[in-house]
């Protein structure tokens, strides 16, 4: 691991630029270079030492001979992995855990909204129609949380506080304190038959792509609720939309999509008892400040040859 001062810091994209501009004083005498477009970043690649951003537009990192740290503004590493040509010794870190409380709250808010039929209630209100709906209880509901990282654990903790029985799915199935029971990922389809609701909170990797597919959806009860706060690619959107329109699922709340923005022609837009939000579940007022502080901490760790906080394992993809 190379030690020594990092003299220049790059940031890529509006969010990263805003974060570091607001925290400029914390960078000390380091030069700050803001790259707003792919061409601007690629033009700087041979002198990048440390970069904060997401979705850096690099097909081959081999020209980045001075690079020592790639720091993501979010938790998903799928936007840069696999990093072809990445020089040896480059550390990759992410903002894992910072958004977990906000995403846990979002998931529970969406579950409550779906359970109480809020999309239908609001539709009736706008139509000035007095139509009774039939809410269901989260208390006692078998809640299947797929993913046992910081976000999954926050969802589980809040779900149990509302009386749900929380079943966890994780890669190795090892027990996790926040879950009532935990199982390995290969049992997901089997466990879906027990679920009153499913929350997807897994990282996007080749193993999780299309995880919630037709085979799993066909095992779900017709009242099952689906929440996705993971990545759009973990859900087969066409199969999900077909079942929502057919009335063979209870409802869905989606914050992430295979294409963002969601295309106007997507059948998800008018699916019954469905809530769609524009990838906001991670957001909270203090998120930018906390990510900037983590980035500066990891800069100093790289400079002193210490391990970074929240390292990304490129062999796992998160």
Image: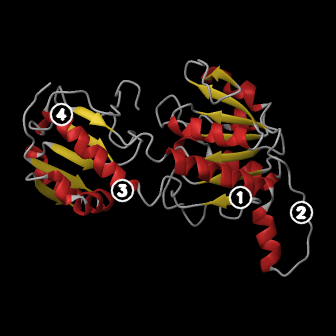
Question: Which residue is at a point 88% across and 78% down the rendered structure image?
Answer: 129
Specify whether 256 is left or right of 2: right
Residue reaching furthest bottom?
Answer: 128
Q: Earlier in the sequence, mark 1 or mark 2?
A: 2
Secondary element type, mark 2: loop
* Disc number for residue 288: 3
- State the CA–CA distance, disc 4 to disc 2: 57 Å
Secondary element type, mark 1: strand
- Give the camera-side residue of 51 and 231: 51
Q: Which residue is mark 4?
A: 302
- State the CA–CA distance, disc 2 to disc 3: 40 Å
Question: Which residue is at a point 65% across and 63% down the rendered structure image?
Answer: 269
Q: Which residue is mark 2?
A: 133
- State the CA–CA distance, disc 4 to disc 1: 45 Å
- Give the camera-side residue of 60 and 228: 228
Task: Count neighbours of disc 1 (C-alpha within 10 A) and say few if under 14, some if 14 to 19, many if 20 or more.
Answer: many
Is 255 drawn above or below residue 67 in the view shown?
below
Q: What percent of the width, then of the height, locates residue 293?
A: 29, 48
Question: Which residue is at a point 81% across and 52% down the rendered structure image?
Answer: 246
* Disc number for residue 274: 1
Q: Earlier in the sequence, mark 4 or mark 2?
A: 2
Let me know if residue 56 appears in the view: no
The quarter of the displayed image where residue 138 is located: top right
- State the CA–CA distance, disc 1 to disc 2: 15 Å
Task: Count neighbours of disc 4 (C-alpha within 10 A) and say few if under 14, some if 14 to 19, many if 20 or more.
Answer: many
Q: Kindly indicate whether the residue at mark 2 contacts the one at mark 1 (C-beta within 8 angstroms).
A: no
Q: Earlier in the sequence, mark 3 or mark 4?
A: 3
Q: Nearer the viewer, mark 2 or mark 3?
A: 3
Q: Earlier in the sequence, mark 2 or mark 3?
A: 2
Secondary element type, mark 3: helix
- State the CA–CA distance, disc 3 to disc 4: 21 Å
Question: Which residue is at a point 70% across and 41% down the rendered structure image?
Answer: 159
């Amino acid at each position: 691991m190379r030690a020594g001062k990092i003299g220049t810091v790059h940031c890529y994209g509006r969010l990263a630029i805003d974060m570091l501009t607001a925290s400029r004083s914390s960078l000390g005498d380091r030069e700050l270079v803001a790259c707003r477009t792919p061409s601007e970043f690629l033009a700087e690649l041979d002198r990048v030492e440390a970069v904060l951003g997401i979705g850096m537009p690099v097909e081959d990192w081999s020209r980045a001979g001075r690079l020592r740290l790639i720091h993501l503004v979010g938790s998903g590493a799928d936007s840069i992995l696999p990093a072809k040509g990445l020089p040896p010794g480059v550390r990759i870190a992410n903002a894992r855990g910072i958004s977990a409380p906000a995403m846990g709250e979002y998931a529970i808010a969406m579950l409550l909204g779906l359970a109480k039929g809020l999309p239908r209630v609001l539709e009736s209100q706008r139509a000035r129609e007095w139509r009774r709906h039939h809410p269901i209880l989260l208390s006692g509901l078998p809640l299947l949380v797929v993913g046992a990282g910081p976000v999954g654990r926050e969802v589980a903790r809040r779900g149990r506080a509302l009386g749900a029985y929380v079943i966890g799915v994780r890669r190795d199935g090892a027990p996790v304190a926040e879950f009532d029971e935990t199982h390995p990922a290969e049992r997901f389809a089997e466990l879906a038959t027990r679920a009153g609701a499913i929350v997807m909170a897994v990282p996007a990797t080749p193993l999780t792509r299309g995880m919630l597919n037709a085979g799993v959806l066909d095992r779900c009860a017709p009242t099952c609720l689906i929440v996705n706060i993971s990545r759009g690619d973990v859900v087969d959107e066409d199969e999900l939309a077909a079942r929502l329109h057919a009335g063979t699922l209870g409802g869905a709340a989606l914050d992430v999509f295979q294409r963002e923005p969601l295309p106007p022609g997507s059948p998800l837009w008018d699916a019954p008892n469905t809530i769609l939000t524009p990838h906001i579940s991670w957001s909270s007022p203090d998120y930018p400040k906390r990510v900037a502080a983590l980035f500066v901490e990891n800069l100093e760790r790289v400079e002193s040859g210490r391990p970074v906080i929240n390292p990304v394992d490129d062999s796992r993809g998160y």
